[in-house]
Image (cartoon, helix red, strand yellow):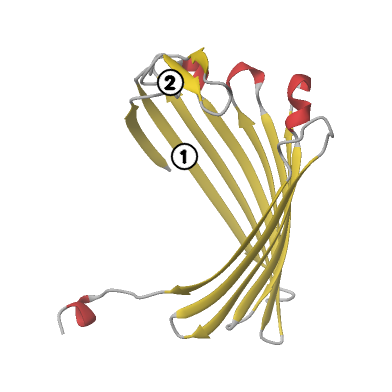
Amino acid sequence: MILGAGHNSNVNNGLLSTQYTLPGLGDISVRGEEPISDNFHNEILSLDFNNILKSNTAIKIKNSLLAYNKSYLNEKDENISVFTYKPSVSYIYNKYLYGLESNISRVLKKENNDINILSLSPFISNKKFKASLDYQKLLYTNSENKNKNFEKYSFGFLYNLQKNINLFLNLGKITRIKKERIDIDRASKELGIAYNYRFNNKNMYT
């Protein structure tokens, strides 16, 4: 459990200038809101339940529950709460780890903009690599926002080249569910090398 508090100097994503022009659109002049500051408190509760089958110790079942809340003292419309349930199962066979993770989330937002998030992620890994697929669907509960619904597909690959050096590849695609929207579809590609170095007393002072 985590409890916290903080201050946000621009809760409503307001503008430093209440009037500004949109470049590239004939310098159209529009008006915006001034920034609003407010204090907030937040809470996180996370519970994990692990179960290794006695009949087959290579099979592990995990259930995770997460509850998050962020509440402002005055700007109640900016409050947000998230409830997540993440069941998963994994199986070890011949030095490989096979797994299937899922995620069911409900996001409670202002003005009836609640969102349901569903995802499914199979993966395979060993000491040298990890490969995973991920499917995610985001659905607004309000019928007026149905055109914002989308699906996301992604593929991730991580390979250990040396002790502290990893090669990674990430591919992703977001596609709209309803054809009314034309600004949602996009694809992403990422390829890189990561180097991990752990500082400790021995290599810091010798």
Q: Is residue 89 left or right of residue 195?
A: right
Q: Position of residue 118 (x, y in %)?
A: 73, 44
**Residue, x 48% and y 20% (percent of image)?**
21
Quadrant including the N terminus: top left
Q: What is the spatial separation of the Cα atoms under label 2 and label 1, in whole angstroms?
A: 27 Å
Q: Nearer the viewer, residue 45 or 76?
A: 76
Residue 143 versus residue 61 in the image, above or below: above
Mark number for residue 44?
1
**Residue, x 45% and y 21% (percent of image)?**
12
Q: Earlier in the sequence, mark 2 or mark 1?
A: 2
* Amino acid residing under circle 2: Gly
Residue farthest along the right direction in this orientation = 179
Residue farthest along the left direction in this orientation = 205
Q: Nearer the viewer, residue 24 or 122?
A: 24
Q: Position of residue 150 (x, y in %)?
A: 75, 40
Residue 80 versus residue 103 in the image, above or below: above
**Residue, x 53% and y 70% (percent of image)?**
192
Q: Position of residue 143 (x, y in %)?
A: 78, 21
Q: Is residue 157 left or right of residue 55?
A: left
Q: Is residue 126 left or right of residue 69?
A: right
Crowding at mark 1 (Cα within 10 Å: few <14, some 14-19, many 20+): some
Q: In which image quadrant can residue 73 be found?
A: top left
Q: In which image quadrant can residue 116 be found?
A: top right
Residue 179 versus residue 11 in the image, above or below: below
Q: In which image quadrant can residue 140 be found?
A: top right
Where disc 1 sits, the SS reads strand
Residue 128 versus residue 50 in the image, above or below: below
Where disc 2 sits, the SS reads loop
Q: Position of residue 206 (x, y in %)?
A: 16, 85
> In front of the other: label 2 or label 1?
2
* Amino acid residing under circle 1: Ile
Mark number for residue 14?
2
